[in-house]
Amino acid sequence: MRPTHDNTADHKDAILAAMTPVVMEDGGSDGDDQTDLLTKTKPKTKRPPLYKVMLLNDDFTPMEFVVHVLERFFGLNHAHAFEIMLTVHKKGLAVVGVFSHEIAETKVAQVMDFARRHQHPLQCTMEKEE
Ligand code: TYC
């Protein structure tokens, strides 16, 4: 006679599998809407924000000093440094690099300190990138 409830080992495994929530390592779909409600999570892979470091124009800092700053603190070659300095001179400001918050802060502090020590009013600022 056939039992009312099939309690074979295989069938017990199938019942347990159906009751076990599927946790996907990537938070993706397992193709089952029911378990998705229980297990879908946002993969948090947000990159840290970047910061633009800018030089501002003024009427007093010598051009050669600005070129030197760009070579020394931003690793630009002479031609590139001269070009960026001229952009600042003509347009009022220019982005001279994009960095993590900590590196950007260090660059700004280094430039401001160097300018102050040489008694030039050169200004360097940072701004979060959109
Ligand atoms: N305008 C300055 C001058 O004519 C040169 C200069 C360039 C100053 C860039 C600051 O960030 C600057 N001597």
Image (cartoon, grey):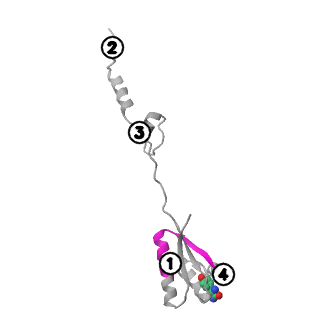
Vertical side of 32 occupied by 105: above or below: below
Q: Earlier in the sequence, mark 2 or mark 1?
A: 2
Quadrant in which the C terminus is drawn? bottom right
Q: Position of residue 126 (x, y in %)?
A: 53, 73
Residue at 36% over, 34% down:
20
Which residue position holds label 1?
Answer: 108
Q: Earlier in the sequence, mark 1 or mark 3?
A: 3
Which residue position holds label 3?
Answer: 38
Residue at 40% over, 37% down:
22
Q: Earlier in the sequence, mark 4 or mark 1?
A: 4
Q: Which residues are magenta?
A: 92-111
For badge 4, the amino acid type reads Leu
Q: Nearer the viewer, residue 92 or 96?
A: 92
- Label 1 near label 4: C-beta < 8 Å? no
Query: Circle 3 — which element?
Result: helix
Which residue position holds label 4?
Answer: 86
Label 3 to label 2: alpha-carbon separation: 32 Å
- Label 3 near label 4: C-beta < 8 Å? no
Q: Is mark 2 within 8 Å of ligand 1?
A: no
Q: Tag on residue 44? A: none
Q: Nearer the viewer, residue 84 or 93?
A: 93
